[in-house]
Image (cartoon, rainbow, N blue to C red):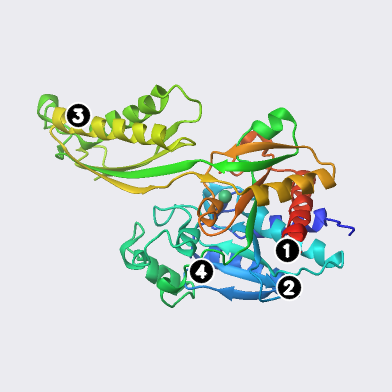
Amino acid sequence: MQLTIEQFRLSQELDQLGSISEAPPPVVTRVVFTDADVRGREFVKSLCREAGLSIRDDPAGNTSARWQGSDPGLAPVGTGSHIDAIPNAGRFDGTVGVLGGLEAIRALQRAGFRPKRSIELVIFTSEEPTRFGIGCLGSRLLSGLLDPSAGESLKDRDGISLNQARASAGFTGSLATVALPRGYYSAFAELHIEQGPLLEQRQVPLGVVTAIAAPASLKIQIEGEGGHAGAVLMPGRHDAFLAAAEIALAVESAALSTGSIDTVGTVGVCDVFPGAVNSIPSRVRIEVDVRDIDQPRRDAVLRQIAEACDKTAAKRHVKIHSEMVNADPPAQCDPIVVNALVQACETHKIRFERMISRAYHDSLFMSRIAPTAMLFVPSRGGVSHRPDEYSSPEAIAQGVLVLAEALSRLSS
Ligand SMILES: [Zn+2]
């Protein structure tokens, strides 16, 4: 089989998808179920139709595009990723796995390969937590890890429920029907940019992912007492923002306290109410993200943060309510899928390294229902979630080539 990757065409398609954004280029902002997201989905679906794939949307907005195998009764092989993007993001996160997955299928078609198992390209809904505060919404629902009642309970900042938002994007029906049974896919492989600096630093073209780190996220509400910034004197204050600041610093020291480079803690959201320069903050909401590849160590950090909340509440006489949004276990990748990727690298004489994914991906959840692994391509400067995020067309093409080879092995 002679596999060739149409690198130039793929780059153009990545650029075209990147231009479908709520912000002017090079900024990509494509939040789930917004107009840009809907247009992005349409663009990808039109390319899938061109490739002769049959398309199915589920009520959560996950899309699968199927290349029918010669034995359609067999469980299909899955590949894919996401196309939603956080505000002020770049062109490659997620999209490389979607458009690259499609190019892998087209390369197999061009080579005259005929899969025995069907191959399905999956476009997951809302991998990014931007709108509903929870990442990997689509793959969580697919894997049955998120209760379908989330449709009503999850709301965005404007109070729009997940059910309302998906309906506005054309996805209706019960979320209870989204979950796939274990074994629905015989294997799942996700191509993704590394989003870190290791491959580039080590000058290794590809990373075969053997485990995915476990993220946990917290929403912390702090209620203090507002008042006039001039009239209320310092000793009598119960400033909600200052309590939040103490907690944020506690997150940093808790993450540092493990002594492991693999523990990371971030406060990425801070909403201050009423948000006026001459008003003492009465209410603050912060969101905390803690990750590690070692679950007990990560959970110890979460306990330290909880203790810091209790101490701060007592010291500053504020009310603190903390809610665990998610605390997922880490995923071990499946040796069969890892080996298919490794053998594909060897077949095409492309150097690779086994590595761990510290970022959060749909594969974390797919691993619950299917043998799963991931393939990373280098990110320039390790930069991601920024407009200057970049992976070279050559690097992406190597990833697509290995993905195509692995898909052919897994679907034969
Ligand atoms: Zn991603």
Q: Nearer the viewer, mark 1 or mark 3?
A: 1
What amino acid is found at the position of numbered circle 2 in the picture? Gly
The disc, 3 or 2, on the residue closer to the chain's N-terminal end is 2
Task: Determine the residue positioned at 80% across, 58% down.
Answer: 9
Q: Cα distance, mark 3 to mark 2? A: 60 Å
**For disc 2, does the CB lie below 8 Å from ligand 1?**
no
Question: Which part of the image, by quadrant, shows the C terminus?
Answer: bottom right
The disc, 4 or 1, on the residue closer to the chain's N-terminal end is 4
What amino acid is found at the position of numbered circle 4 in the picture? Gly
The disc, 2 or 4, on the residue closer to the chain's N-terminal end is 4
Which quadrant of the view contains residue 167?
Answer: bottom left
Q: Where is residue 143 shown, x and y percent of the image?
A: 48, 61
As drawn, the label of residue 69 is 2
The disc, 1 or 2, on the residue closer to the chain's N-terminal end is 2
The residue nearer to you, when weighing 114 against 190, is: 114
Q: Mark 3 points at which residue?
A: 311
Task: Determine the residue positioned at 53% across, 47% down.
Answer: 88
What amino acid is found at the position of numbered circle 3 in the picture? Lys
The residue nearer to you, when weighing 209 against 127, is: 209
Q: How many labels does the image show?
A: 4
